[in-house]
Structures are given as structure tokens and as C-alpha cells.
Amino acid sequence: MAANGVASSSKYLDPSKALEHLASYDRKDGLSVQELLDSQTHGGLTYNDFLLLPGKIDFPASDVVTESRITRNVTLKTPFISSPMDTVTEKEMAIHMALLGGIGVIHHNQTPEDQASMVRTVKRHENGFINDPVVLSPEHHVSDVLDVKLRLGFCGIPITDTGALGGKLLGIITSRDVQFRDGNDLISDAMTTDVVTAPAGTTLLEANAEVMAVGRPQATAVFAVAEFANKFGVPVIADGGISNIGHIVKALALGAGSVMMGGLLAGTTEAPGEYFWHDGKRVKTYRGMGSLEAMEQGKTAPTGSKGKPATGAPKNALNPTSSKPNAIVENAATSRYFSESSAVKVAQGVSGDVTDKGSIVHFLPYLHVGVQHSLQDIGVRSVTELRERVLSGDVRFEMRTASAQVEGGVHGLNS
């Protein structure tokens, strides 16, 4: 010890040689992706079971490029795909996903004619402009809006002073504006004139169901499939288990070219279905395509003695008031799980409702910026660089214990 009680500096290494000393370590910090996803050592892993270690940050998040391939010939500006579920993707979702750099896959739990009509509507929506929009005037009534919705499937309608294309735009009438209005009310009393946004940071709480006892944890599954498919130049879409930005980045790190999101986008304005109130919260119906409700969609209702629907016959969960007959007996949900000929349907998914998240016009950019910041934290400037550096072993991973997962979540708040 020196006379003043401070340890002699001769006991410490020269700080100018810190990097040189770091290079002398026998192994890198953390695990390589191959070490992490060794199922014989760690078993199957979910996205919550690991983290990516931070890297060197010498660039702004805005420099991060999120372009990625979803097929050999198709590249998206953002690696986001909305799932082909009947409570997630129809024409409105597909249009807005495309405008925001992603893509929406329209579900086929409907007649081929209805599906083709939706595709045509999406294709007509060029660069965010509809060439022949439905237009109403302030003198029209709420009943006119409801009629448009019934006939055409939407009610986001421009209001002009003349009620015709080319007139002065006065506002927009939406489903929210007419939800609790009488049909005789004038549009001028109900239409939207200001932009209203939902609060940011809304999260989705979903219950996981142990249904068939067959499958594989998502992270392990994505890595195994991507590792094989990428040898042949075939991009992989990570479908399932995506519930936050971290999961998106982890899927990309494990080799996926994009992520397909169902529950994460359910409850948005553009998702199919009507909002309703449940336990004081504004919600929308959401169901997995393996749920009993989805499997029963389109099934002919049992009839009574006079040919009318029997009491207690199942209703359409997306449109409980619909009286339109539907002769489809089997559908996309049953064919997906090869259950067309099963007299008794077994649930392979869940159903319920999800909280209103507002519009994806605001939600998807939030996800995009979050992905940019995550890649910045890792120290990579693009999705392509992330994949390359993961495979080379430069990007490292760390397992998380159950305690670490709790510690990494939000805690210590009273409300």
C-alpha cells in the first residue's frame, strides 16, 4: 500500500492495452446461436428464454435498414406481415400494411368470390389513393352510412359540400362516429373533423393454450427451419408467438426474413369486426383459426320445424346481427387442420377479445422504430447484417432464467 492508503498503480494493467487484453480471453462473451439453440443441451427455447447481447453503437437508429425478403423475388421495406386470420386481415388491414411497408395476407375463411372482391379492392388502392371513392354530403343521414357499410363493407367515407367527388372536403365519417347514432341523424352532426389517435404503448395480454401437446417452442423451430431453408435461398416467415418488438428482433436474428403477426395486430382499427365494450374496455373479437368458433364459421345453422334457424344456433362472431344465409359447410379453419371430415371438432386455438389498440397507421411505425432501435443496440445497421453476424458468431446470445425474465419485465409499479 502507498503511504496515503491508496493501492499502488503497479498492480493494475495499463488501460491503453485494455482491448489487447480482451482479445486474449479464451472465448467470447455469451453464446453463439448454434450453442444457444443446441436442443440436446438446452431443450426447446421460446423467444422469452434468451436475450441478444449489446454491441458497439456508433450510428443513429434512423440509419438502420429494415428491408428483408419474404420470398426469393419479393422484398419488403419492413419485415411485417399480417396473418391470414378472419379477425386480423381483410382489405383494410391489407391496404394499410402495404402503405406502411409491409404486406397483409387476406384470410380465406370466406367464399372465393368474397376473397377475390377483397383482393380487387386492395389492388385498386394505388399509392394510398382510391380513384372512385364513395362520397356523401352533410345532408345525408347516418342510415346512408350504414347502408354503404352493409353493401360495400366499409364506412370510412369522405364528406364533401356537394356529396360528390370534386367537392370541398368537409370531413370524414367513420364507424366510430355512427356507432351510437340514430339512423335519422344528419351526417353533419356526427362526422369526424379532427384527427383522433389512441394512446401509445398499449399492450396485448394473451393466454397460451396447451392444446394438442404436439409442437416445438417457437425460437427453436424458427432457427431449425431457417438454417435449412436458407441453404437453398428460401426466406422463412416466423409465424406465431410474436407479441412484442423483442420477439420480432429475435425471430429475425434466428434467420427469419419476416414475421407474421396475428394477435399483435388484432384489436386495431383496420382489423375486421366491430368494437364492443367488455369489463369497461373497448375491445374487438379475436380468435385463432384453430378455435371452435373459426371452425364453425360458415356452417349451416340447424333449422327448426318450419325451416327457421333453431333457438341457440351459432351466430357469426364477427357480425352477430347478420341474417345473410351461408351454405359453406367447411372452411379455411377446418382445412388448415385437416378436420373437414371430423364430426366432432377439437379446438386447436383460442378465442376471446383484445383491447382497442387504435390504428396501425400509428402502431406499425412504432414497431418499425422499435426494431431500428433494437438493431442499433445490437450494433448492426440492417437485417442482412444482423443475419450475417449471427451466423459468424459476432452477435452473441445469453440464456435467461425465470428470475431474469421477471427482472427484465416491468416491476415495482403500483398501477
Image (spheres, helix red, strand yellow):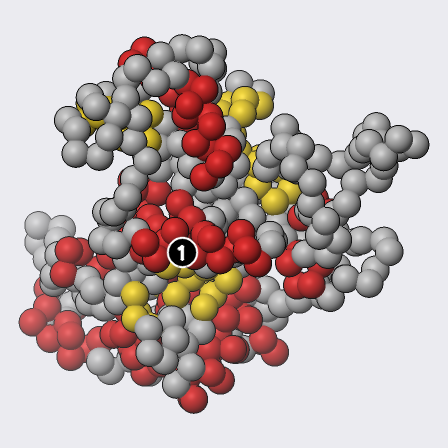
| Residue 266 percent location from the top left of the image | 48, 43
Q: Which residue is mark 1?
A: 120
Question: Which residue is farthest right?
Answer: 305
Q: Can residue 255 be seen here?
A: no
Q: Quadrant of the N terminus?
A: bottom left
| Residue 255 percent location from the top left of the image | 40, 74
Rendered residue at 82%/32% (across/down): 308
Q: Quadrant of the C terminus?
A: top left
Rendered residue at 63%/28% (across/down): 321
Q: Can residue 9 be seen here?
A: yes
Question: Which residue is farthest bottom?
Answer: 232
Closer-to-camera residue (396/201): 201
| Residue 375 percent location from the top left of the image | 26, 61
Rendered residue at 42%/49% (across/down): 91
Can you say whether 164 is above or below 111 in the image?
A: above
Q: Is residue 23 left or right of residue 5?
A: right
Closer-to-camera residue (184/358): 184
Closer-to-camera residue (213/180): 180
Could you say which quadrant of the image residue 56 lies in? bottom left
| Residue 119 percent location from the top left of the image | 43, 57
Closer-to-camera residue (135/180): 135
Rendered residue at 39%/51% (across/down): 121
Could you say which quadrant of the image residue 123 lies in? bottom left
Could you say which quadrant of the image residue 252 lies in? bottom left
**Amino acid at pointer 1:** Arg
Count of all numbered marks drawn on residues in the image: 1
Can you say whether 327 is above or below 386 in the image?
A: above
SS of the residue at dot 1?
A: helix
